[in-house]
Image: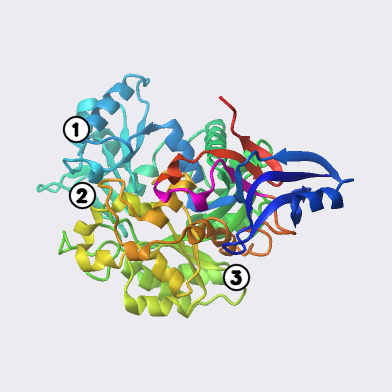
Amino acid sequence: MGTLFYGGTIYTMEDETSIAEAVYVEDGTIIEVGNKSELLHTFRHRIDEEYNMDGATMYPGFVDSHLHIIGHGEKLLHLDLSSMKSAKEVLQALERKVEELKPGDWLIADGWNENQWQDARIMDKKELDDISRGHPIILSRICRHAIIVNSKVLELAGITTETEDPQGGKIIRDRSGEPTGYLLDQAQELVKEMMPPISESKLEETVKVAIEDLLRLGLVGGHSEDLSYYGGFKRTLKAYHQILPKKYKFRAHLLVHHLVFNEMFDQGLQYGDGGEFTTLGAMKIFSDGALGGRTAWLSEPYHDDSENAGIPIHKRQDLEILFQKARKFQHPVAVHAIGDKAVEEIVTCIEKYPLDNDLKDRIIHAQIMNDKLLDRLKKIPVVLDIQPSFVASDFPWVKDRLGDSRTNAAYPWKTYLNNGIACAGGSDAPIEEVNPLLGMQAAVTRRSNMDGQIYGSHQKLSVFEAISLYTKGSAYVINHVHDRGLIKPGYVADFTILERDLFQHDPDLFHEIEVKATIVDGEIMYEKTEA
């Protein structure tokens, strides 16, 4: 017995003109798509539920191709600094928060972003020491490629003037060589290794809170990388299993960080295992940092820091060892690479160690590109995992980092699609807002949230292309084009139902559209309640 969905506009996303009146679903699978009266007649003895959309608009379920699900939950539960407009505002929020803590508790806050402050500066340990010397304080930058800590944390981690910079990281020091508390990329691990572990109950709560919010925003799934944190592979996967699908249905595709790759095999698991709602994915590798902290690895130095071209996380020989390890088990890789030099290194490795099965490698971010590298990308079977919201949040300050000529060719989403390079769309939450409509809005308008100006108008996507990133694109990168990303017979019954039609709405106002319902596996996982 099944459910008939009708009463609104249904975009199947097979092409820009493919619209249906109704969809019939049984056991989580789409059985037929077409005319309402015909479906009512054909399946009259099998329909036991009807869902009237009351004029709303249905799309294939939106899937975020790159986010950190548990990190999003932490953002919802921790002190969130992402909307604060000055160092003063951040410090005042920390002062209020420390009053709530017990002696010795850690004060953890996420999301500071000096690039959206009028006085763009980096805070240091002295300012945090003035708030508390007894509580360890750690503040994660919005990009999660830098942290600021107080003296208590440096003491606990054993970071002194004699501590050397780790490979792929940097300890920022003052003129006397004293650490300032500002730690970049792999230097963060010196602190994170000695932080107290999160309890199992708190970890499960964090997953639950995140999934609830993702469903509320119309997401039926997400590709996340969490499994090397929070106590390790087994513990973190267990937390997911306690929520999915026991409490909610949501398709979590979980990348496996190279540090816990062996743990996956120790559990008797490999790519594609883990269950329909907690599926294990590619080996995750970081190859560089981020533009905000000037650690993304560029082929030429930063425009505003002529002695610095960024930080490679791995030496070439170590990167090749990771590729060889993945290929030994026929695993794809998913590599964080923002700068063009970082992307070049990954392309070289993919060329040298190609997959000989149908699975897909992915390069995550790929924000900075050059013509020679673009020609090489077109010739290899790789998916670019892009985050359209970066355009809205990074401009105009990114011009300072790159200069005019490189900025004009940055975040080149349209160029990728025009060159036949497959792309999937995500948010990188909690670094950006997870709402997929904000990502689509940024892809179509390329309007900055900071000054309201449009940057790179020649790289704007159509509405159809933007939606496709979060439907067909997210399905393609994990080899599910045969059963996800479209509203079509034989495909999963995952739907995002919006109150408004994206194709008929002002793209600058996509963020105002509300989600009416989120359907996963044919079941209502979220439904808007009437006020």
Q: Is residue 318 visible?
A: no
- Amino acid beneath label 2: Ile
Q: For the residues marked 2 and 1, what is the alpha-carbon distance in whole angstroms?
A: 16 Å
Up-down: is 384 above or below 59?
below
Q: Which residue is mark 2?
A: 172
Residue 313, magenta (yes or no)? no
Q: Is residue 218 visible?
A: yes
Rendered image: mark on residue 330: 3
| Dot 2: element | strand
Q: For the residues marked 2 and 3, what is the alpha-carbon distance in whole angstroms?
A: 39 Å
**Residue 531: percent from the left, percent from the top?**
55, 24
Up-down: is 319 above or below 492?
below
Given residues 218 and 376, the one toward you in this image is 218
**Residue 117: percent from the left, percent from the top?**
21, 40
Which residue ends up furthest to the right in the rendered image?
45
Using a 10 Å C-alpha cutoff, classify the residue at mark 1 as few (fewer than 14 neighbours), some (14 to 19) or many (20 or more): few
Given residues 330 and 357, the one toward you in this image is 357
- Amino acid beneath label 3: Gln
Q: Which residue is mark 1?
A: 127
Q: For the residues marked 3 and 1, what is the alpha-carbon distance in whole angstroms?
A: 49 Å
Magenta-colored span: 494-508
Given residues 384 and 451, the one toward you in this image is 451
